[in-house]
Image: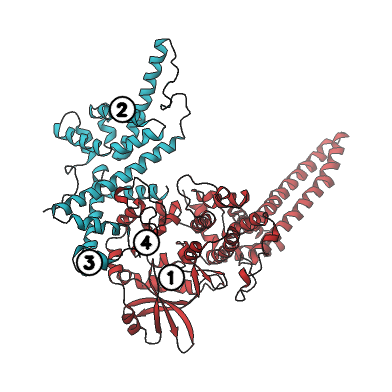
Amino acid sequence: MKPRDSHFAATRWTLVARASGSDSAAQAALSELCAAYYAPVNAFLRAEGRTEDISRELAHEFFARVLAGGALGGADAARGRFRSYLLGALKHFLADHRDHANREKRGGGITPEPLDTGTNAGQPLPAARDDERAFDRQWALTLIARALEIIGVELRDAGKASHFDALKPWLTGENPALSRAETAQHLGVSEGAVKVAIHRLRQRFREAVKAEIAVTVRGDGDVDDELRYLLAVLVAQ
Amino acid sequence: MQNPTHTCPQCHSPIPADAPGGLCPACVLLGVAGPTNLSQASAANAPTIEEVAAAFPELEIIEIIGQGGMGIVFKARQPRLDRLVALKILPPALAAQPGFAERFTREARVLARLAHPHIVAIYDFGESAGFYYLIMEFVNGVNLRAAMRAGVKPEQALLLVPRICEALQFAHDHGVLHRDIKPENILLDTHGSPKLADFGIAKLAGEEAMKTGLTATGAALGTAAYMAPEQVEKPATVDHRADIYSLGVVLYEMLTGELPLGRFAAPSEKSTVNRGVDDVVMRALEKQRERRQQSATAMKTEVEHASGARGQSSLPSHNAPVAGSPAQAPTRDSSSNIHIPIVAALHACFGALGLVAAIAVLFGIGLPTGIVISQGETQAAGILGIIAFFITGFLLLISLPGIIGGWGLYQGRPWGRLLIIILGFLQLLNIPFGTALGIYTLWVLFKDAQTPALLNQATSPK
């Protein structure tokens, strides 16, 4: 079968964002893109000290706003990366949200005691960079997970599900704990075939990661930059 | 496998619970960022011991002793000299890179000049039957990784690091960066004396490999945890302070058994070292290199000071060989350039003389004129006063930077060096003694390897 390079339709998010609201295909693509990167948004909200439930609720609200075209303005979105843009939109959304909550508080005339200690009400926010780091880190993990899923599905479709599980550890490189001979025996193929399979798996994985990144950036030249950035995020952890 | 799921076999950092597929995410992405096919090609084409034996008839190839980031290392014997050597074969895939042969020759020559008791010596290099090789000193011992598994005490760690700093400073003075400091590259001989291996090999392997922070075989992906942030983010700008960061990671790991990842604890919380050591380690691990120790010598001094505060009784003096190593010559001054302290002292002396002169002028002319003015003789005295004022100002202007810059240079501070370079030029005009001092200053400082890097930094717009 022909390998799919990405879960997404072959389009860049900037095009999607520019067309949002007017084009139903673009709208569907944007919603797909948002669903894919739900986890980083959630990680950001959690890193600011919210509970799982509240974070999920807020994330839903946020994405609903994004999809309604309320958070991703076309002109701005056409610059830069989906990752930066989504983060910017999220911060903007949260600021709005806080303003709104404060207005309601004042309007009610009664200042409610913070009952739910899980919210960040009354607690100092952690340093701004922690939540951003959580966002970026989760972004990188999501990217890896998506690429792994793509090649996993491909191999399963090709009837080689056990190959994927056995060969996956080589994606992090060589190490003495991995024996090609043992793997070959386990899979019932020759050692040479394992060598080739590892080589192909790495190559496919690399392509898949880059294709995933390509969807979220402006041009091909940005793919390597984004990759390096995400790598730096993970290394700095 | 030691830790089947919790530690990455590549970089030895813990694998987070949410890692996709249970794979170390940093190493997975490093694999993607790497130069296409290079890692696979080199791993698949690793030469066998028979092939190598055939290519090196003048050597007795004994065994494979390591498969490091930059190829395979064999233990071998040179029968004529009756000595053991380590033969490193670079990955064949590297040699296919454009411009490799020239770069290899150029870099290997530089490395071969690094003769230091704590640096693994390079005896020879070249190409034979298509293999690019380095013949190196054979170190009978273990690498620091193995030593750490066996357990390195904080006291030992604090003794090792200053010696590694000496080696680093020596190399930095010769314009060579290590770029890949990690426990695997720090060898300990049977006396426990450290020897840095694989100096600059990363660069020799090529700009492309360095750009992604990736070395040629998959096995080297583990370097990630030891790389300074700028090595990942802006590899082209890397300078000697990246080595200081990496050494900081190694020291942290020796003290705590962990890597400084995320929000890490201070070493004193995890081991028996004092707070002073915390400061040294944390400074070396600063994300911004401007905030790290600015030279290996500075780090050495700080480590020695901090560990000295534990009580000198528990530590031998820093000139004593580790564990009574007979092989070790008395520790040489890590600042290999003996002229630098002399320059610093001369400028400070000149500065002090200037200061004395300034005070003399102030009191000899300035004070009497003040008195004359107070007696009503204003016009002539006014001119004298102005002259005295300017002479004093001028003397202060040239003497204070001399004293301050001399001190800064002596301490190894970049601003001190810069100040003295500027003064060196100014002194040229100060015939005759100043001219001599100026010539001497400029000769010493421009011969020194650190100066070009400093000037680049000072003049570049960023």
Q: Tell which residue pokes out farthest to the left in this image.
A: A1
Q: Which residue is mark 2?
A: A57
State the image coordinates of residue A89 (x, y, percent, origin top left). 32, 31
Of tags 2 and 1, the one toward the viewer is: 2
Marked residue nearer the N-terminal end (1 or 4): 4
Q: Amino acid at mark 2?
A: Glu
Of tags 3 and 1, the one toward the viewer is: 3
Q: Which one is nearer the viewer's eye here, B165 or B44?
A: B44
Identify the image quadrant of the N terminus of chain B: bottom left
State the image coordinates of residue B47 (x, y, percent, origin top left). 31, 75
Regarding mark 3 in the picture, which secondary structure is present there? helix
Q: Amino acid at mark 3?
A: Gln
Q: Tell which residue pokes out farthest to the bottom in this image.
A: B80
Q: Can residue A69 be seen by looking at this rendering? A: yes
Provide the letter of the chain coloured cyan: A
Q: Which residue is mark 3?
A: A185
Q: Which residue is mark 1?
A: B107
* Marker disc for residue B1: 4
- Cα distance between the residues tagged 2 and 1: 58 Å
